[in-house]
Image: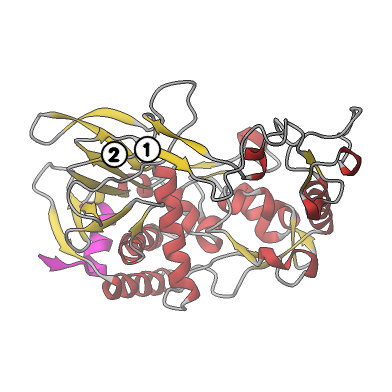
Amino acid sequence: MGRLTFDRLRSAVAGDAVALRSRTTLQPAGGSGDKVFPPTYAVDRGIKYAFEERQMDDDTTTTTVLLDSVASQANRAELALLEGWELNELKFPVPYVDFASHKEVEDLGRLTVLEVPHRFADAIFRDSLLDNTLFRLSDIGRAITDAQPRNATALFRYAPTALLFGQWDSTGPKGGLGSKFQRAYVSEIVGLDAKIGVKVGSRLDPLQIEREAADRQIFVHEDPDQVWTLDPEKAAVQKGKKGPNVKGDGRPSEINHGNIAPSIDETAGGVTISKAIQTTVVSLAALRRLRFPGHGREAETAARAAVAALGVVSIAYQHEIDFDLRSRCLLVPEHGPRIELLSRDGSPAEVVDLDRTVARELILQAAAHAKEQGIGWEESKIKLDPAPKLLELIRKSREVSASKTPSE
């Protein structure tokens, strides 16, 4: 296997390849046969995991379980890019809203385009100020609002990751008719040959408090710091009702005392798998549908190659932040990252090695080439401040949360 060079990537983007693909085989950190826990989903009844039958390469079918969804994988890839940007290893525009300089919300820190749910089209950006102007009314905001796949220059210049991971401007002035950029980066992790297990639970109270001890007379204390009381005279009064506010059903378990009888949950007890597969595809066909009018063919190819390079970096950097998906779902790769270049003529894929150093060099070369072609991305920071109305909304929301009792 060779190494992925910028010239090879540029040729692939120009039309030599349809997509870049990365497939990584993973095993539970506890070893073969160890249980892993997939994400759970709200259901009326039955299993809480996403099982399905899938067709395999050898024409057999197997029961698979979703371990990490497309949306979740995109978020992890964005956080991997953010880590590289914060380490100053990667140079690309990352607009952000600075809450840290406002004392009442400084705990929110800095929220970047790689962290908010709807990327550059998110309401957090909409309700923030760029140079004391509401973002949507600023020059950058107007350019982002007007951006379309047939003219993606503004989005490439100010937030190129949105072209990689997709964006729908549904909260802008055009509402549901706002521009849509399809997701070019698609990744998921599934477990193969999945078999569901059971989850057991119990609690032995060292105080041995009986459930009947309070006779359902545990109340919410009028002083929130005290949490609960047995004295109805010191109980809070529930809004809109008369009498003391009973905490839940008034039993000791409501205040985390008492035994919990052993139980078995057959709907969310984890799974055993033969292995897991992470499949990541960067669609070069999707990137070729992006247009950058007025810049010429070579500049368009350069812009698309830079976005593709961000996808390559996402694969390499995500591999290095590991596959600790959630509690009891740590996976270990059986090999390093590698990329396949898929040709449109159906010939065998070209396989190239990839690591953090190669990926970092790719993005540097791609950005420099785009700049040479007159379509470079923004190099100065894009810092927004939350608008006063957004700060006030957050303040009021926190007041409401603080005033609520646990039973509300």
- Magenta span: 1-16
> Is residue 8 in the magenta section?
yes
Q: Nearer the viewer's eye, disc 2 or disc 1?
A: 1
How has the structure been colored for display? secondary structure
Residue under the image location 13 percent in, 42 percent down: 345
Amino acid at circle 2: Val
Find numbered disc 2 in the image and state the secondary structure of the residue it sits on.
strand
Residue under the image location 9 percent in, 65 percent down: 1
Kindly indicate the quadrant of the structure image that contains residue 45: top left
Residue under the image location 25 percent in, 70 percent down: 355
Q: How many marks can you see?
A: 2
Q: Which residue is mark 1?
A: 199
Find numbered disc 1 in the image and state the secondary structure of the residue it sits on.
strand
Residue 50 in picture, x, y percent from top left? 36, 32
- Work out whether 88 lies above or below 388: below
Residue 300 relative to residue 131: left or right: left
Q: Is residue 293 visible?
A: no
The mark found on residue 271 in the picture is 2
Q: Is residue 397 visible?
A: yes
- Work out whether 86 lies above or below 384: below
Residues 255 and 393: in front is 255
Residue 51 in picture, x, y percent from top left? 31, 30
Q: CA distance from mark 2 to mark 1?
A: 10 Å
Is the residue marked by circle 2 packed among few (<14), some (14-19), or many (20+) residues within 10 Å? many
Kindly check if marks 2 and 1 are in contact, taking CB atoms under 8 A apart as contact: no
Predominant secondary structure, magenta span? helix
